[in-house]
Image: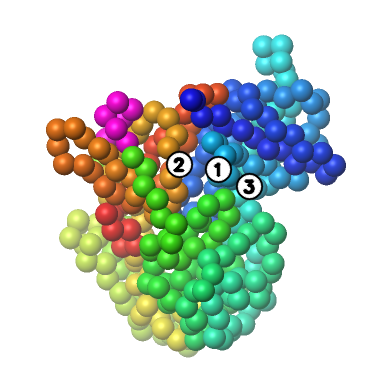
Amino acid sequence: MASVPSLIVQLTHDTYILNECLSFRFEKERYSPSTVLTGKWYCKQDEFDDVISLSLMIDGKMLHVGYPTSGCEVMYENGRRVLKVNSRGYTQALALNQPTPGLQFDIDLETLATSAVVCPGVSYQQNTPVVKYVNYYDGTSIWDAIVCYSIRATGTYPYIRGANTVSISTTPSDIGVVNVFPTNLISFGSGSDYSSLISEISESDADGTYATFVAQNEEAISKNIIRKKEIPFNYEWIMDSELGLQSMLNYSMRGMCYDKIKFFGYSGGDLLDYVAINYTNRLPYIGKISRLVLEGSQGNIITTVHCYRDAYCDN
């Protein structure tokens, strides 16, 4: 049975479920603070000028819940009304809100995030480690602070699990496996992207003395990439400048090497779930999902996953 990408449109006083999809694209990525949805659905209503939220559901699984961006437009195409949508998941608010500067002491993930601003529709992984401090400073967003917390607590970068759950675990408790078979496999390969690599970061101290802290990226240097960066003292990492510099170098390596699998259909899957290619005449491939893209229309979905190999993603 073909998968149906359903759009749930919540208005101020009504809710509509649209099942006739002309086209859609959904994406979530290991280092992005939110999911992204674009698409077109046939509709019977003339106006959607008071949209509160847009949700994408496929095979009973909620993949995206967020707010409209760039507006929602109703137009006529081939004699029928079409709703065009652009939407970001609610966790995007974490990157847009800048709390009052100040140190937060002895906090876990949820306490840190909600002590600043309560963002509707956002949830957090429970029972996370307590760290001694995280610092909001001069325009630091909630997401920036969560990144700092996650690296200090677990040594890894945070990500969005489910529709809008901020997670930091490298092995989610509900981890799943997406099985891909030769009959629905479109392509499988690997690639590299060194466009963000930084080879060295030099940071001044709180008094402005240049090059007080220096960190080098041997991974970049070994690839003959020389890209140096000078930054002022980073108060976000006020008590651990070395770890702060290393986190910047690690982030610059995001997605630098990856495997890419493209296949027909929708088989579930989420960030950090496993994807397995079950060959009949060779050893199976197994990797962890770092980027998930769904594209298609009514009953015709193509899935593309990337499995990163970088400082925070090890496949």
Reading the image, the residue beneath label 3 is 65
Residue 95: x and y in percent read 59, 60
Does 262 lie within the magenta span? no
Residue 210: x and y in percent read 39, 81
Above/below status of 252 relative to 130: above
Q: Nearer the viewer, mark 3 or mark 2?
A: 2
For the record, the magenta segment spans 180-189
The front one of 180 and 233 is 180
Residue at 37%, 77% in the rendered image: 243
**Label 1 Cα neighbours within 10 Å, binned few <14 / some 14-19 / many ≥20:** few
Q: Which mark is residue 61?
A: 1
Residue 134: x and y in percent read 53, 80
The image quadrant where one finds the C terminus is bottom left
Q: Earlier in the sequence, mark 1 or mark 2?
A: 1
Real-space Cα separation, disc 1 to disc 2, in angstroms? 8 Å
The kind of secondary structure the magenta stretch mainly shows is strand
Residue at 59%, 72% in the rendered image: 110
Above/below status of 77 relative to 292: above
Name the amino acid type tagged 1.
Lys
Above/below status of 1 relative to 88: above
Residue 139 in view of the camera: no
Examine the image and state in which quarter residue 157 appears: bottom left
Element class at badge 3:
strand
Residue at 27%, 35% in the rendered image: 188
Does 184 lie within the magenta span? yes
Residue 42: x and y in percent read 68, 23
Element class at badge 1:
strand
Name the amino acid type tagged 3.
Val
Reading the image, the residue beneath label 2 is 268
Element class at badge 2:
loop
**Label 2 Cα neighbours within 10 Å, binned few <14 / some 14-19 / many ≥20:** some
